[in-house]
Image (tube, rainbow, N blue to C red):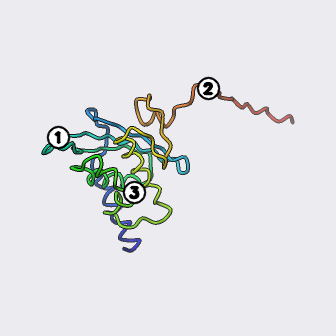
């Protein structure tokens, strides 16, 4: 697949993202962030019983991330629908981003971020691929701007130059 084809698939996923937004009736939520690039992603998962099996009914996401992270999260939420937890956990970041084609090396972390959020939502265990974010905050923006209680702020005041 050419770079142009990949960019077109990512553009299409961005132009019409699927399953974006908070799910208030979710059964589980996973949130991860990448200290390397600053991207953050939260994924909600809702289950249903189907033929005696517990499967993913739907998944949604919110992200502070680049277009590739949005595109991968969008296609991943479509891919996991109807899968059991075990089936979804067996999917790698490459599997979750496969409908977009091979990602360039500098964008593989986007697929790993989505995989980490999905794993966190399905297991309740933070992913080693991305750092867990504080679970007590209500929104993704609050997670992004949250400061630890023991963190102090310093105000820097510049003294005017003497003439």
Q: Residue 162, position in %: x, y?
A: 86, 34
Residue annotated with mark 2: 150
Up/down of 148 relative to 40, above or below:
above
Res 49 label: 1
Looking at the rendered image, the quarter that the N terminus falls into is: bottom left
Res 149 label: none
Q: Residue 98, position in %: x, y?
A: 34, 63
Residue at image coords 32%, 36%: 28
Q: Residue 48, position in %: x, y?
A: 19, 40
Looking at the rendered image, the quarter that the C terminus falls into is: top right
Separation (CA) of disc 3 from disc 1? 26 Å
Nearer mark to the viewer, of 3 and 1: 1
Up/down of 135 relative to 6, above or below:
above
Q: Earlier in the sequence, mark 1 or mark 2?
A: 1
Asked whether, in this view, residue 52 is left or right of residue 142, the answer is: left
Nearer mark to the viewer, of 3 and 2: 3
Helix, strand or loop at disc 2?
Answer: loop
Residue at image coords 31%, 57%: 13
Residue annotated with mark 3: 93
Helix, strand or loop at disc 3?
Answer: helix
Separation (CA) of disc 1 from disc 2? 44 Å
Label 3, residues with CA under 10 Å away: few <14, some 14-19, many ≥20? many
């Amino acid at each position: 697949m050419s770079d142009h084809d990949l960019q077109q698939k990512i553009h299409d996923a961005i132009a019409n993202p699927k399953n974006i937004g908070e799910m208030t009736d979710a059964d589980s939520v996973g949130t991860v962030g990448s200290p390397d690039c600053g991207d953050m992603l939260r994924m909600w998962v809702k289950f249903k019983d189907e033929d005696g099996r517990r499967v993913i009914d739907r998944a949604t996401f919110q992200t502070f991330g680049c277009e590739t992270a949005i595109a991968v999260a969008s296609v991943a939420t479509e891919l996991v629908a109807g899968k059991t937890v075990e089936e979804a956990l067996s999917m790698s970041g490459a599997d979750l981003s496969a409908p977009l084609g091979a990602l360039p090396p500098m964008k593989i972390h986007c697929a790993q971020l989505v995989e980490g959020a999905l794993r966190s939502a399905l297991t309740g265990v933070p992913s080693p691929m991305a750092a867990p974010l504080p679970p007590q905050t209500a929104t993704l923006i609050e997670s992004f701007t949250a400061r630890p209680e023991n963190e102090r702020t310093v105000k820097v005041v510049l003294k005017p130059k003497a003439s």
